[in-house]
Image (cartoon, rainbow, N blue to C red):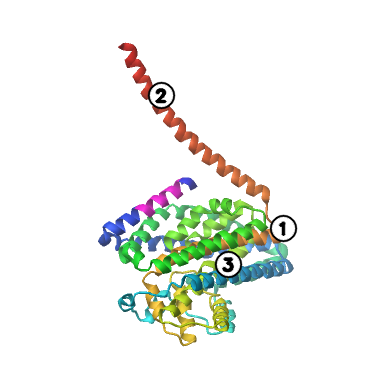
Amino acid sequence: MKTSRLTLYIFISLILGTIVGWKFPEIGSNMHPLAQIFLNMIKMVIAPLLFSVIVTGIATHGNMKSLGKLGAKTLIYFATATSFALVIGLSVGLIFKPGLGFATSLISKNMLDTATVMASAGQSVHTSTANMFIEMVPTSIVKAMADGNLLQIVVFSIFFALAICSAGEKAKPVLNCITSLSEVMFKFTHFVMNFAPIGVFGAISYTIAESGLGILFNYAKIILSLYFALTLFLFVILNIACRIVGISVFSLLRAIREPALLAFTTSTSEAALPQAMKIMENFGVSKNIVGFVMPTGYTFNLDGSTLYLALAMLFSLQIVGIELQPLQLLFIMGTLMLTSKGIAGVPRVALVVLAGTLSGFGYPLIGVAILLGIDQILDMGRTTVNLIGNCIATVVVAKWENEFNYSKMEEFNEQFQKNSLKKYNKIVFSDIKIEEHSNFGKNETSEIR
């Protein structure tokens, strides 16, 4: 299936899913298995794909010294980007105050036990920085792959790649095998992506059926505040990052439109990871940069989730009338910066971090219960920005390492323009032929007369 067709089919599925969930909620509420099956298929691909890509990238191009430099530069960029995300989320929350004037009737209506949130996410908040680093190291790579723990897979893959480098020629057969595995898994991903429209239809119809379009009006202030903040972060901070490295943010968005749409509709960044990695390679980023930065970014560079946490924290406090002093705000934001690291990019996990931070400071958890009702809608936006932020991170780090191929990027953009022009000409000339055909009939009739 061609990329342009797949994008069109996903968009059609998005519209149909919305209509079914809105007009036929009984049917829409039963469509969730379609989305879950597709997400399970994606998770089936991710572990072997990440392992093969990271090992191949490091073993063929890297060494311990270059890997250390790459890791340091990557973390510096991640820390900078997420800091700006926190600042924007905090600023929008303080300016728009989405929690003020929130209807008290909605609080009682949506009051839920926070334990439900914890159970639904299946995650826990790190109790200390030490635990975060301990959990980075897998006790079993099989268990890490089964659990879908991206960071543990990255750590194991890095050590495995360095071991191959140390073994030299003796390890060449192993490297060749893993290189072949990488190619096979990308083909595997291509097959799985053909089921994306079905998964998107199931996810959207279920979401609309369960929440209803009316919920958008009740929570309009917090929803609009978040999406405004995400847009601001994307077209100001990430746009500046793109300009610094000499690329257009719009050309990059155009390149990753398909995985971005997939991340938005499924609310799961993992669903878009394999395809986004392949696109960034084609866009000009070297394979070893993509293989290291993107999986690591899914743990340490969740720009959208970090921004959301800052805004959601203020929302939760504003509902109960708590105002924080500047020093308190800084301390809480610093805590969010740490507790948001090392969590998987799965739905609702941001609520777990929010609940843990609120309870840690002794604040009421009512905000978490309220946000649970629209978390799927909020998650769609923040997950998309997480993906875009990590794609841009690969370009920035590749440029920093002098491993970004501008010629390849230009070829990619030219190919896109050619494809777009072909579609345009096809539509225009088909219309002309239809018009000529109709005119021919008219002229022929007039001559007979």
Magenta stretch prevailing secondary structure: helix
Q: Position of residue 134 (x, y in %)?
A: 58, 81
Q: Quadrant of residue 437?
A: top left
Asked if labels 1 and 2 touch by Cβ distance under 8 angstroms, the answer is: no
What kind of residue is marked 1?
Answer: Asn
Q: Earlier in the sequence, mark 1 or mark 3?
A: 3
Q: Can residue 123 be seen by looking at this rendering?
A: no
For this orientation, the residue located farthest to the right is 65
Q: Which residue is mark 1?
A: 402
Q: Which residue is mark 2?
A: 436
What span is colored magenta in the figure? 5-15
Q: Which residue is mark 3?
A: 297
Q: Position of residue 312 (x, y in %)?
A: 46, 74
Residue 126 to residue 297: above or below: below
Residue 375 colored in magenta in the image: no
Q: Nearer the viewer, mark 2 or mark 3?
A: 2
Callout 3: 10 Å neighbours few (<14), some, many (20+)?
many
Residue 6 colored in magenta in the image: yes
The kind of secondary structure element at disc 1 is loop
